[in-house]
Image (cartoon, helix red, strand yellow):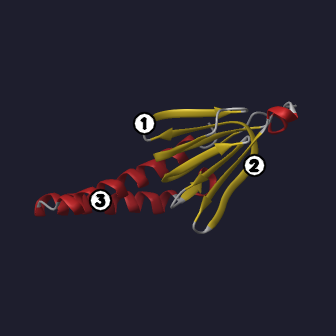
Amino acid sequence: MADPEKIIKVSVVTPDGIVYSHNATMVAMRAIDGDRAIMYDHLPIVTPLAIGEVRVKRTHEMNDRVDHIAVNGGYIEFSNNEATIIADSAERARNIDVKRAQSAKKRAEQHMQEAKEKHDEREMLEAEIALRRAVNRLHVRENYGK
């Protein structure tokens, strides 16, 4: 059993509400300046997140289970042993619809090709972001259960 004094609370919130909320021993994510991991008594921090996977190592009562969450950017704020991730969108690995993510990936690739042919940098950037989001969702789903 995890030492109750060494537990952090991890929450992921989107405009649609709370996507995730559990006690954990660690949360790891990709910030815009590199990978980060936060454990009990980490210094307070607020940092922007890149499109990527958030991994939450649950308490020992959960047999050290790791939950995987796809986030599309946002911020993490950590203080007083509470980590709050605020993102435009986030999805737990177990809830990711692979067919929908594959369709989004295909649409983004087509959009990138069209933008490239038109030499439209703005559309190219939007398509690139959509592609990174779809690939991230597929990657997170693929890692689920590993």
Q: Looking at the rendering, in which quadrant would you find the C terminus?
A: top right
Alpha-carbon distance for marks 1 and 2?
A: 26 Å
Tag on residue 50?
none
At numbered mark 1, what does the secondary structure look like: helix, strand or loop?
loop
Mark 3 or 1 closer to N-term? Answer: 1
The x and y percentages for residue 34 are 45, 34
Residue at the image position 64 percent from the left and 33 percent from the top: 43
The x and y percentages for residue 104 are 39, 61
At numbered mark 2, what does the secondary structure look like: helix, strand or loop?
strand
The x and y percentages for residue 101 are 45, 58
Question: In the depicted view, which residue is nearer to us: 96 or 50?
Answer: 50
Residue at the spot of label 1: 33
Residue at the spot of label 2: 22
Q: Residues within 10 Å of mark 1 (few under 14, many from 20)?
A: few
Alpha-carbon distance for marks 3 and 2?
A: 33 Å
Residue at the spot of label 3: 127
At label 1, the amino acid type is: Asp
At label 2, the amino acid type is: His
Mark 1 or 2 closer to N-term? Answer: 2
Question: In the depicted view, which residue is nearer to us: 94 or 37?
Answer: 37
Labels 3, 1: front one: 1
Labels 3, 2: front one: 2
At label 3, the amino acid type is: Ala
Asked if the residues shown at circle 3 and circle 2 are in contact, with their CB atoms under 8 angstroms apart, the answer is: no
Residue at the image position 72 percent from the left and 32 percent from the top: 41
The x and y percentages for residue 92 are 61, 53
Q: Residues within 10 Å of mark 2 (few under 14, many from 20)?
A: some
Tally of marks: 3
